Amino acid sequence: MRTGFADLHHTVLKGDLCSYCGGCVPACPADVLSYARERPVIDGPCASGCRICFDVCPENQANSTVLDAYMADHRPAVERQLVGRLADPDLLARTGSGGVTTGLALYLLESGRVDAVVLTGFGGANAWTPRPMIATTRDEVVAASGPKYALTPTLSVLDRIADEGYERVMFVGLPCHIESLRQLQTAGDRLADRPRRAVRAITHAVGLWCGNNFRAEGTERFISAAGIDPAEVTEVGYTRRDGRLEFSVTTPDGSAGAPFGQYLGYLLAGQTAPSCQGCRRWHAAYADISVGGLDTPGLKWSGFMVQTREGQDLVSGAEAAGYITVQDMPLDERARLGRKNTRSRGFGTPKPRNSEGNQR
């Protein structure tokens, strides 16, 4: 019998479709998977008949009916399309769009509804590499705000959630992270104790709209192209100068900034990760709430979709507590998102088949 990792290698890794979400490694009951060069590798014998690493991979769609049933059980009476932004003007000034995700995280954390928030911050292998993090304070949440344009194994923190004893956790991730998370949450007793305790602790899942993601070296090349030695960089982030968002780089000699559009344009021109080139899941359909920036110039709001009862309760609580301001999404924005969703259904690479030949 072919093992799950053999299926994962044959249908995902060999085709360079791995999104580096981080779900497969903590899911492995034999603890023989690790990461090398943004992909999983096997370090020991794989248990015969075990398929969990392949089954939780977001590129394997065999269990989509299970996830659809999960969402059907959690749907609110009315799915809402909204725009929102942080009510705090000082925090809002630091964001690229409306900062709704930051507001939701602060509300849950400061109201005691969660113990921790899983986010993506900077400062991984180097200053410009994103890293998954567990935030437990306001300062940590705020420091992690803003987009990160590199593949990040956010689900790799599941072992830490279990080991450090967090019981109520908000998870923020891209659509691929959310899909793997839901597959883990519906795997039940197929998971070992640590990942099972971790995914049961996740009470809220917020998905971030995603059109593309990039290899980590894309940002390094952008820094080099600007005439800065990446080895000298101590910090990267986002600042707002004269109302314009900038990608900023700090070295011992001081700070320099480039227009955010210039930075993103450089990445889009040739740094897109192969796994993202055919992705169809831009709006995180399996999240409680999916959030993203709007394309309307000068409109500093986040667009978001409330997709579960848990998400509806979260938005209502954060709005009532004064963390976010919410309005119905304008009709033209709804129409634009509807067109984008229609286009995405016909876009992308065919999804892998499992070893029995079933399309997921």
Image: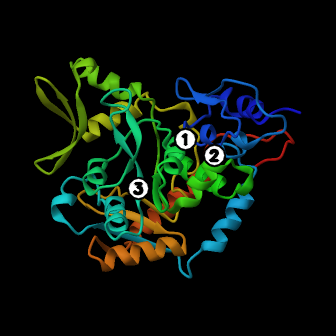
Q: Secondary structure at mark 1?
A: loop
Label 1–label 2 contact, CB within 8 A: yes
Label 3–label 1 contact, CB within 8 A: no
- Which is more N-terminal, label 2 or label 1? 1
Q: Which residue is mark 2?
A: 58
77 or 251, which lies in front? Answer: 251
Q: Badge 1, how many Cα within 10 Å: few under 14, some, many 20+?
A: many
Quarter occupied by residue 48: top right
Q: Badge 3, how many Cα within 10 Å: few under 14, some, many 20+?
A: many
Q: Which residue is mark 1?
A: 21
Quadrant for the N terminus in the image: top right
**Residue 208 visible within the image:** no
Q: Secondary structure at mark 3?
A: strand
User: Which residue appears at 30% of the width and 63% of the height?
Assistant: 301
Q: Amino acid at mark 3?
A: Val
Query: In 3D space, how far apart are the residues under numbered discs 1 and 2 (Cα atoms)?
Result: 8 Å
Q: Is residue 344 above or below residue 45?
A: below
Q: x and y percent of residue 238 in the render?
A: 23, 43
Q: Amino acid at mark 2?
A: Pro
Q: Amino acid at mark 1?
A: Cys
Q: x and y percent of residue 278 in the render?
A: 59, 40
Q: Badge 2, how many Cα within 10 Å: few under 14, some, many 20+?
A: many
Q: Which residue is mark 3?
A: 117
